[in-house]
Structure formats: C-alpha cells, structure tokens
Image (cartoon, helix red, strand yellow):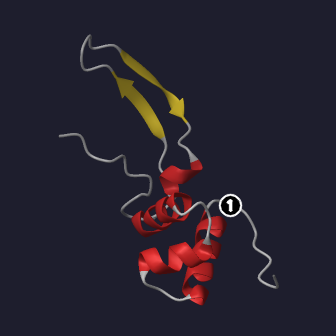
Amino acid sequence: MPHKVISKCPVCNSNLTVTRLECKKCGTVIQNEFQLSKFAYLSKDQLDFIEVFLKCRGNIKDVEKELGVSYPTVRSKLYDAITALGYTVDKKE
C-alpha cells in the first residue's frame, strides 16, 4: 500500500524536496529536483478543512454546519490555510 508523500522534515520541520521518481512497471528512474504543489505542504487538518470548504462551495454557513463549529472558527481555519499557502490575510475584513 503506497504511503502519502511527506513534505516536512521529521527532524527540523523544513520543506522536503522530491529527488527521485520511479516507474514500478518498467523500472525507469528519473532523478532531479521536483517541486511539490503548495497543497503538499499543508497539514492534514488544513487539507480536510479545504476539502469541506470546497465541497460547500465556500459557503461559510454550510461549512459551519458540516464541521459543527462557529463562524469565528471557520474564519480562523480559513485564514490558517490561506497563510499556509503563502498568502497574506487582511483580518480587518
């Protein structure tokens, strides 16, 4: 059973780089430095939240119901995910 690619170093928590890809069928190996998606560096909780947010088409009331949390908690989780993707959030909105 394949494992999810880890994106953070278990020792220092820095971002890891993928350097090897291998075809299990023919054995071809490609070595280089490959870039992971920004989403690969999100925590499981952040990814789970984004999945619910997208499923609810960004409707915060629906996200509240789905997760059983308050509006401020949804906003906090949204800001956390946005920040983790490398964007800044104007919390004055």
* Vertical order, 77 against 31 (above or below): below
Residue at (56% x, 38% y) in the render: 35
Location of residue 11 in the rendering, given as x and y in whole percent from the top left corner:
38, 64
- Amino acid type shown at disc 1: Gly
Q: Which image quarter: residue 45?
A: bottom left
* Vertical order, 33 against 81 (above or below): above
Q: Is residue 37 left or right of residue 23?
A: right
Location of residue 49 in the rendering, given as x and y in whole percent from the top left corner:
48, 67
* Vertical order, 38 against 18 (above or below): below
Q: Is residue 50 visible?
A: yes
Callout 1: few (<14), some (14-19), or many (20+) C-alpha neighbours within 10 Å?
A: few
Query: For the C terminus, which image quadrant?
Result: bottom right
* Vertical order, 6 against 33 (above or below): below
**Residue at the outermost top position:** 26
Residue at (53% x, 33% y) in the render: 34
Q: Nearer the viewer, residue 60 or 77?
A: 60
Location of residue 18 in the rendering, given as x and y in whole percent from the top left corner:
45, 38
Give the total of numbered labels: 1
Residue at (40% x, 64% y) in the render: 44
Location of residue 70 in the rendering, given as x and y in whole percent from the top left corner:
53, 89
SS type, badge 1: loop
Q: Is residue 15 visible?
A: no
Query: For the N terminus, which image quadrant?
Result: top left
Residue at (60% x, 88% y) in the render: 72
**Residue at the outermost left position:** 1
Q: Nearer the viewer, residue 29 or 66?
A: 66
Question: Would you name the residue on which mark 1 appears?
Answer: 86
Q: Nearer the viewer, residue 5 or 67?
A: 67
